Amino acid sequence: MELAKKLEGKIREVYEQMRYMLAVSGETIISQVSLQQFFSGNRGVDLLVSDVSYVDPFDGLHYRGVPLDQVMQKLPKPQGSAFPYAGGLFAFLLTGDFPTLEEAMEVEDLWKEKADIPDYVLNILRTMPSDSHPMTMFSQAILALQGQSKFAKTYSNGLCREDHWRVMLEDSLELTAKTPALAAAIYNIKYGNGSMRKIDKDLDWSANFAHLIYKEWDVQYQDLCRLFFCLHADQGVGNVSAHAACLVNSALSDVYYSCSAAMNGLAGPLHGRANQDCIEWLLKILEQFNGRLPSKVELEKFVWDTLEKGKVIPGYGHAVLRCTDPRFIAQYEFGKQYMPDDMLFQLVDLLYQIVPGILKKQGKAKGVWPNVDAISGTLQYHCGLKQLDFYTVLFGVGRMLGITANLVWNRALMLPLERPQSITFEMVKNRLHDMNDYSGMNPDFHY
Ligand code: HAX
């Protein structure tokens, strides 16, 4: 496999660099944590390493050091499409080099060979209760594939540590190959008649999702899939889904265990499920105004009412970003081009004009700008996917590309078991005391 050969050289370089840095500067303090950060989910503390992607608060998301919009421009694309092959993105996330068309097609072709889902997995999905959330089904289906892990088998047979990444790469290709088909199986079982068709070998990975849910005729939707999956691929490894995967994988659990854990985190309303919450909120607004677009004044009142009920504005704010999410912008441009007259899209546009100002005025949220989830559901809805609880699965399909790329690198660098130390409240108090910081001490408070 050309991809593995290329990766091998890159890995050697980074690994040697890491070993050298450790040998020379191993004791240098490069990150610290304040009491505030300690009790705020370690927000803003540099604790993890990944070259696959990086979120800059003001400059947005970068894949392999390149701003997202440039990545989307430079990756190879299917003929007639303005949106890239996911296979090319996967090669880029792994190697950091923009792939040629041939290199992108190597991944796409490998994926085609491995796309079939075993019948027993389909049967598990079919026997799940009909009210199961699609994310539960997705996580379950990934876990059900675990028996296929080459890493788990070869590890038991004494695979040497230096070769862990190679088998992790094979497992990653195997799982990502099946991901659109897994999502489509869930879609067809939950909302359709449960039938499954084979992938279309003439279509790329992303467009095959459209084909598998019987929307192969919808060229615009194929493009939306290409855009959507690429935009959702990665976002550093501090976010809940990627971090969950890396943590689980650090115990040398394989790709299937790790990615299933990731999807459980993605299912949370403060993370991937925000796209479902957001579209539900948008539809509620239109319902409240009897199906018409509210005026700015009416909408401002609705937003304030939401906040006063103690709820968050879904799709706004971010743990890191302090600017409009470039993933929002890319989807907004898609909407402007293909669905400018769609009332939901116009509502998204109107909210974009007023919500940041309201959140600033309220003064709580540190990030006030729209994130990826503020618009993603609107585009899906316009293209006919009206099963709102499915949207987080689509997020998960894309996210699998970045997560698995990170897992391959984590094994390549032989990163150890992740095991931060936890301390007691008493110890926290004692540390403040030792540092002569008595200002936070309440003499009336006893543990
Ligand atoms: N609406 C109202 N209040 C908000 C808010 C929003 N959109 N965003 C943040 N706040 C509030 C927080 O609830 C918090 O309030 P409390 O102090 O009362 O707890 C306060 O502002 C400070 O929060 P923060 O430091 O700015 O934000 P966090 O890093 O803690 O959280 C979140 C980041 C994305 C979870 C948050 O902005 C949020 O809940 N947004 C709405 C949900 C959402 O869109 N999530 C998807 C994020 C993108 C993503 O990762 N998708 O997977």
Image (cartoon, helix red, strand yellow):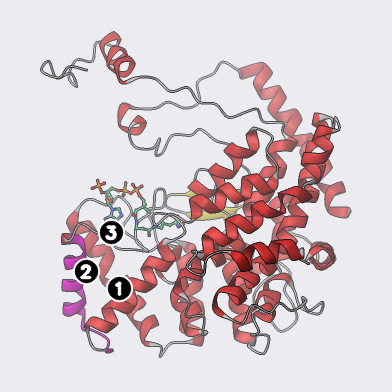
Location of residue 393 (image quadrant)? bottom right
Residue 390 at x, y = what percent?
51, 70
Does mark 1's beta carbon lie closer than 8 Å to ligand 1? no
Does mark 3's beta carbon lie closer than 8 Å to ligand 1? yes
Residue name at image x 84 percent, y 48 percent: 4
Q: How many marks?
A: 3
Residue 47 at x, y = what percent?
51, 32
Left/right placement of residue 266 relative to residue 399 reads: left
State the residue position of label 3.
Answer: 312
Spatial CA span between label 1 and label 2: 9 Å
Residue name at image x 17 percent, y 79 percent: 298
Label 2 element class? helix
Residue 323 at x, y = what percent?
39, 57
State the residue position of label 2.
Answer: 303
Q: Does the magenta stretch include residue 433?
A: no
At label 1, the amino acid type is Leu
Spatial CA span between label 1 and label 3: 14 Å
Residue 8 in view: yes
Residue name at image x 51 percent, y 85 percent: 384
Left/right placement of residue 278 relative to residue 143 reads: left
Answer few, some or many: residues within 10 Å of disc 3's Cα (few below 14, many 20 plus, some between 14 and 19).
Answer: some
Residue name at image x 31 percent, y 58 percent: 368
Q: Is residue 437 above or below residue 273?
A: above
Quadrant of the image for the C terminus?
A: top left
Answer few, some or many: residues within 10 Å of disc 2's Cα (few below 14, many 20 plus, some between 14 and 19).
Answer: some
The numbered dot on residue 351 is 1
Does mark 2's beta carbon lie closer than 8 Å to ligand 1? no
**For the magenta stretch, what is the residue range?**
291-307
